[in-house]
Image (tube, helix red, strand yellow):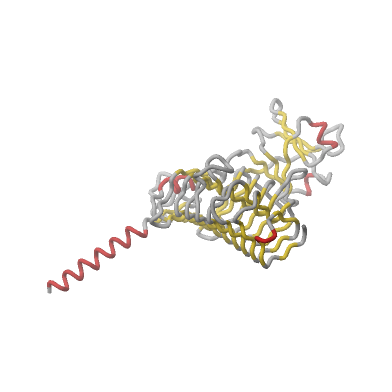
Amino acid sequence: MKTRLNFAVALWAAFVLQTAAEGADYFVNKQGKDANDGASRATSFLTIQRGVDALKPGDTLSIGPGEYFENVQRANLGSPDVDTVIRAEIPGTAVLRGDGPAPEFKKVDGYRFVYAAQFDQQPKAVLEHNQLHTFFPKANVAELEFDPGFFHYDADSKTLYISNLDLSVPDQCRYTVSVEAKQGLELTHPQRVTIEGLAATGFDWGMLLVTPVSCVVRDCVCFMNVGGIMLQPPDGDGGKECGANNVVENCVCYGNTFAGIVRYAAKNDVIRNCYTYKNVRETNEHFGIMHYGGMPGRLLIKNNISWGHNFNFSVKPVHQERLENCVGLGYIRIRDEHMIHNLIGGG
């Protein structure tokens, strides 16, 4: 009898320990309220920020379908002992947005190609989704007539002016306006955090991880931001605290204006099975997958496809990188001896 009792106690203790190790589940959806406890779909939070704030190491946050007009930030999330997860319940259907609907543009008298609309916020950029084109600001309206593909904002009259890159009329286009000079999801010093199935658009960076350690970004989509996914040290492209042992996999980044996927100061990191395309800003360098700064440890770039940039793959300065089984339909910047089994279409 005593043996059975000891076995039952041991079994119960193991169950309690396993439950504690697995952590709690939290939920966010568009029917929720931030005053809820978030512990079930019926009592879910309304915002992703509220859900991320609730997480402790080992917890999982599941985000329901919908557009979430917010930028999410958290410092020191996770621990090296257990996985902490931020995930879309259905990959690709939970979208962080830093942009909003554009007004209806009308032709401006005295100009051939300039159109205007009332808009009551200072725009950071105007996004045209059909051609994946981002409009940046010009100093005055007259410039738009002779240098199309930009916008001008008159704060006094709250008027937004645009001219399309191909000189087409606005009713052939689909616009949104970005008003957030922030990140979609910004985690500072995350440890063993997995981000899975989220999308982000209309931000500075769609997803920014500062000094990440053993983190995974998986099945995410970042489009029409300045940049898609960035992993970096706290001071940008250098420094001793750069994070290490991270993976970016199965992600898609397109229509951004600087780069799709970026690692500054890599240390035993992997970027694999990703697609990056048409991350373009006219007259500036733009990249599919790139690395910059000192490289304390190895960087493996494997099984990726990239096209439509100045540089489809770029590592600068070259050090411990390896480009393997990748397709680049344009130029690359990587040392020859660090490439194996790739298909390169440019130089």
The x and y percentages for residue 47 are 48, 46
Q: Is residue 115 visible?
A: yes
Relative to 124, 52 lies left or right: left
The x and y percentages for residue 3 are 15, 73
Number of dots carrying numbers: 0
The x and y percentages for residue 204 are 62, 42
Q: Quadrant of the C terminus?
A: bottom right
From this view, report whether residue 277 is shown above or below residue 123: below
Quarter of image, res 203: top right
- Of 243 and 257, the residue lying toward us: 243
From this view, report whether residue 284 is shown above or below residue 22: above
From this view, report whether residue 327 is shown above or below residue 255: below
Seen at 60% across and 58% down, the residue is: 251
Quarter of image, res 169: top right
Relative to 111, 79 lies left or right: left
- Of 29 and 165, the residue lying toward us: 165
Q: Quadrant of the N terminus?
A: bottom left
Seen at 71% across and 34% down, the residue is: 118
Q: Is residue 33 visible?
A: no
Outermost residue, top direction? Answer: 156
Outermost residue, left direction? Answer: 1
The x and y percentages for residue 279 are 70, 51
